[in-house]
């Protein structure tokens, strides 16, 4: 959290939380050169990508490929340019994390092994941005109340949208959206 907050502000939240699995003897949709954050605001980082290796990432099992310093490119580079500039993150061990500007162009590799390659990915964004899912609604009120305030905040608890006019008109201290989250 300290890294995310240093870059994105103390109120940063999870935008997306997904798996990153590469099937045996294949690749998948992640093979397309892409960014995890389509918005480009020059000189302003809006999102940070995070990948946690659950298996070693190797060139053989579909390691991530990234084009460093490509975060200011509006459009995907041609494949021959990407291939010339890419770095293959093929020395990532179980438990290692990859953090990167989510505007960097990257892709998954080809898995030529007989085993699945697994990872967990998160996209962390600034607090005023929409989340992929409403994580607070996905958890019961009982579970949310058991979580530390810091975790609730990271899940987006303090930047929830009102569901109706009654919630919108509540006194400020009772509203779901808390001020001063930036």
Image: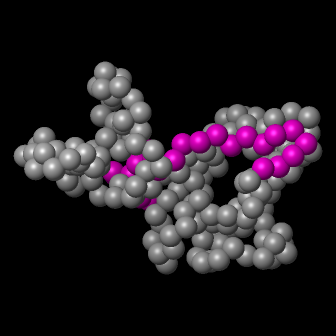
Question: Residue 159's spot in the image, x, y percent?
Answer: 29, 49
Residue at point 77%, 57% (across, down): 31
Question: Residue 168's spot in the image, x, y percent?
Answer: 16, 50
Taking the image as drawn, is residue 90 in sight?
A: no
Question: Residue 34's spot in the image, x, y percent?
Answer: 67, 64
* Up/down of 118 relative to 63, above or below: above
Name which quarter of the figure residue 52 lies in. Answer: top right
* Up/down of 32 relative to 112, above or below: below
Quadrant containing the C terminus in the rendered view:
bottom left
Viewer-proximal residue among 42 and 92: 42
Name which quarter of the figure residue 129 lies in. Answer: bottom left
* Span of residues in magenta: 1-28
Residue at point 64%, 40% (across, down): 19
Q: Does the magenta stretch include residue 24?
A: yes
In the picture, measured across the screen, residue 117 lies left or right of residue 59, that is: left
In the picture, measured across the screen, residue 17 lies left or right of residue 166, that is: right
Taking the image as drawn, is residue 140 in sight?
A: yes
* Up/down of 175 relative to 31, above or below: above
């Amino acid at each position: 959290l300290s890294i995310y907050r240093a870059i994105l502000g103390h109120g940063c939240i999870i935008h997306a939380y997904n798996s990153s699995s590469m099937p045996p003897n294949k690749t998948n949709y992640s093979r397309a050169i892409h960014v995890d954050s389509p918005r480009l605001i020059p000189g302003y980082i809006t999102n940070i990508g995070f990948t946690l290796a659950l298996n070693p990432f190797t060139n053989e099992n579909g390691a991530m490929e990234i084009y460093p310093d490509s975060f200011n490119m509006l459009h995907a580079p041609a494949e021959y340019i990407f291939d010339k500039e890419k770095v293959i993150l093929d020395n990532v061990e179980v438990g290692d994390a990859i953090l990167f500007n989510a505007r960097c162009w990257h892709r998954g590799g080809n898995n030529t092994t007989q085993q699945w390659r697994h990872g967990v990915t998160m996209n962390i964004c600034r607090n005023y941005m929409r989340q992929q899912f409403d994580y607070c609604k996905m958890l019961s009120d009982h579970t949310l109340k058991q979580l530390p305030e810091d975790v609730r905040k990271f899940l987006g608890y303090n930047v929830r949208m009102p569901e109706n006019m009654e919630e919108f008109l509540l006194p400020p201290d009772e509203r779901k959206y808390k001020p001063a989250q930036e």
